[in-house]
Image (cartoon, rainbow, N blue to C red):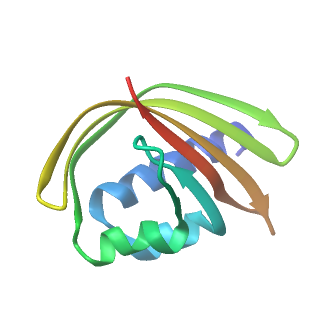
Amino acid sequence: MNTREQIVLNEDRLLTAIKHGDIEELDLLLHEDLLFNLPNGVTITKAMDLETYTSGNLVVNSILPAEQQINLINDIAVVSVKIELKAVYNSQSIEGIFRYLRVWKVFDQEWKVIAGSCVAI
């Protein structure tokens, strides 16, 4: 499997884990020092992200990716993807189309997300 195929597979794994609130899988895919910028400008860490799932504050009903672009730079992959999201966060409905940017880096032959951001479009 080439690098691009590995990233596509890991993006699929990540979205599936998000949809199902699979904390074990998310723990494997997210780097300990992850920083992620939310649409409201707040920066969260891996621990904060995982807490939204363990607390039950986030329930994802639908997550549909489109327009995925992948740039490979040595042992780093930058992914841009448009996602149609339907979820509930803290009892508030979230429905919309968002552009996610994720940065993956390889550590001991395992790809992990080290950074990301999300904006509403």
Give percent across and percent down for residue 72: 78, 35
Residue 84 to residue 15: above or below: above
Inspect this view and state whether residue 36 appears: yes
The quarter holding residue 108 reads bottom right
Q: Residue furthest right?
A: 74
Residue 64: quadrant of the picture: top left
Q: Is residue 110 above or below residue 56?
A: above
Q: Residue furthest front?
A: 41
Comparing 88 with 108, the one in front is 88
Image quadrant in which you'd find residue 120:
top left
- Left or right of residue 66, residue 60 in this image: left
Q: How many marks?
A: 0
Image check: 91 left or right of 79?
left
Residue 5 locus on image (x, y percent): 64, 40
Q: Specify the quadrant that holds the C terminus.
A: top left
Left or right position of 32 against 44? right
User: Would residue 2 be visible to someone looking at this image?
Assistant: no
Residue ID at (54%, 68%): 46
| Towards the viewer: 65 or 39 | 39
Identify whether 84 is placed above or below 113.
above
- Where in the figure is residue 81, as x and y percent of width and height? 49, 31
Give coordinates of residue 45: x percent, y percent: 55, 66
Pick whichever, 21 or 38, lies toward us.
38
Q: Tell me which residue sits at (45%, 47%) in the image.
A: 38
Q: Residue at x 72, y 41 (%)?
A: 77
Left or right: 56, with 8 as reference point: left
Residue depicted at x 64% and y 52%: 115
